[in-house]
Image (tube, grey):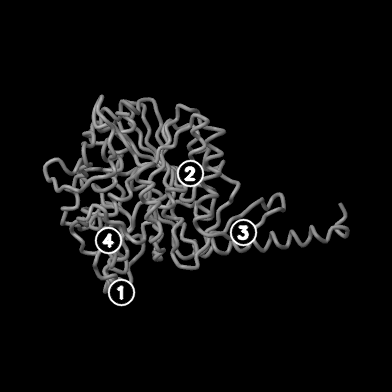
Amino acid sequence: MSTSSSPAVGLRAVVSFLFGLFIFVSTASLLMDRGRESQVQLAVEHRHLEVRVAAAGNRESQVRWTGELMGEAASGSGEKECDLSVGRWVYDNTSQPLYSGRNCSFILDEVACEKYGQNDTKYQHWRWQPDGCDLQRFNATKLLEKLRNKRMVFVGDSINRNQWSSLVCMVESSIPEGLKMREYNGSLISFKAFEYNATIDFYWSPLILESNSDNPIIHRVEYRIIRAEKIEKHASAWSNADILVFNSYLWWRKQRADMRMKVMYGTFEDGDAKLDEVEMVEGFEIALKKLTGWLETNIANKTKIYFAGSSPTHTWASDWGGDDSNKCLNETEPIPDAGYKGATTDYSMMDKAGEIFRPLEKKGIHVQILNFTQLSDNRIDAHPTIFRRQFAPLTAEQIANPSSYADCTHWCLPGVPDVWNLFLYSYLVHK
């Protein structure tokens, strides 16, 4: 084709080049900003500077989600099902914790709070007690038998990796040395129990779709970009799973009031790349609708699928009567109010997830939402704060003000994610 007869093609090429240059420069600046950490840790974390997105007005959706989408499981054979998500935290230093964080060789450093100096381990001894029933007592051997010859994959962000690490610690002590291993392969971390031919994997995909945050180590970016039509690259890593546990919530929350998600349509290769900009929650809907379409086309009915609820953060201490300058630093007990809901905990996004997944039921595909949001909302005491590995040297200003780098997003292990996995255990073993 003659170039002189296609000025539109030349203009489109220039636009595509400039957009590609934008992505390249933003990624290159990240690489220059931070050296590549060891693949074994996979733990450079993004900082979530929460914006107070008003939760007022979400009360109706909170009630609806608790009533319709919660995780329910039988408390025993033949017994009436009860809502595991409604209950209270009970201090129990007899049966809790379920494992030793110091003795779990597979625990990740960003949540190994004891290892990094947290001597007050009271947070480990709180047991979740549902109203009207009991959580099933965890039996690692029983779960491993359920996973025999199967592959279970956690897909999502660092919160999902937090839950994955919890489950691995819950089962690994029952497996003899030499019959278990952990291996890293880019975005994939695998735990293998050889005697059972069972695999429990974590796959880094924080926005579900392909994005400019897909590097499991270096993913701090000023502008988040998702590719609206691209999920196959990620899906190829978990398409053969027998059990899927998705978590995609934290990365859709606003870090600042004007934050929006950039959405790319088309490809550079085809010359039809287009960049759009939407509200974060709209990007969340785009991602879940694409995931739903993929599940409908590619997943067998026997595959068990779970979508984890929102994991609260505790950055604004004024929510529970504290001083915002302290964040969750020095909190030692859960909030006692069973109905507490933090102002920054948005239940409406899980409502949207339920609505988007619901049409799959007609195809015989059930996505079970694990509702652990409110019970986690009470646990202001259970975050790593300053007791975790820091993957960059602290500045003098940070050292002088520990709350400035306190992690009030992730969860110490043993701790709250163990309860999330007890919900999962109830579904996998007893439902």
How many residues crowd around disc 2 within 10 Å: few (fewer than 14), some, or many (20 or more)? few
Q: Which residue is mark 1?
A: 396
Percent position of residue 110, x then y: 31, 54
The CA distance from mark 1 to mark 4 is 17 Å
Residue type marked 1 = Ala
Q: Earlier in the sequence, mark 4 or mark 2?
A: 2
Say what amino acid the circle numbered 3 marks: Asp
Q: Nearer the viewer, mark 3 or mark 4?
A: 3
- Whole-percent x and y of residue 197? 36, 27
Q: Which residue is mark 3?
A: 276
Foreground disc of the pair 1, 3: 3
* Rendered residue at 39%/57% (across/down): 45
Q: Are marks 3 and 4 in contact (CB under 8 Å)?
A: no
**Quadrant that contains the C terminus:** top left
The image quarter containing residue 387 is bottom left
Residue nearest the viewer, comparing 86 with 263:
86
Mark 3 residue element: strand
Is residue 45 visible in the rendered image? The answer is yes
Q: Is residue 93 above or below residue 78?
A: below
Give the mark, 1 or 4, whose residue is nearer the N terminus. 4
Task: Using the numbered discs, state the Cα–Cα distance from disc 4 to disc 2 in whole angstroms.
Answer: 35 Å
> What residue is drawn where x is 49% and y is 62%?
221
Asked whether 420 or 72 is in front, the reply is 72
In front: mark 1 or mark 4?
4
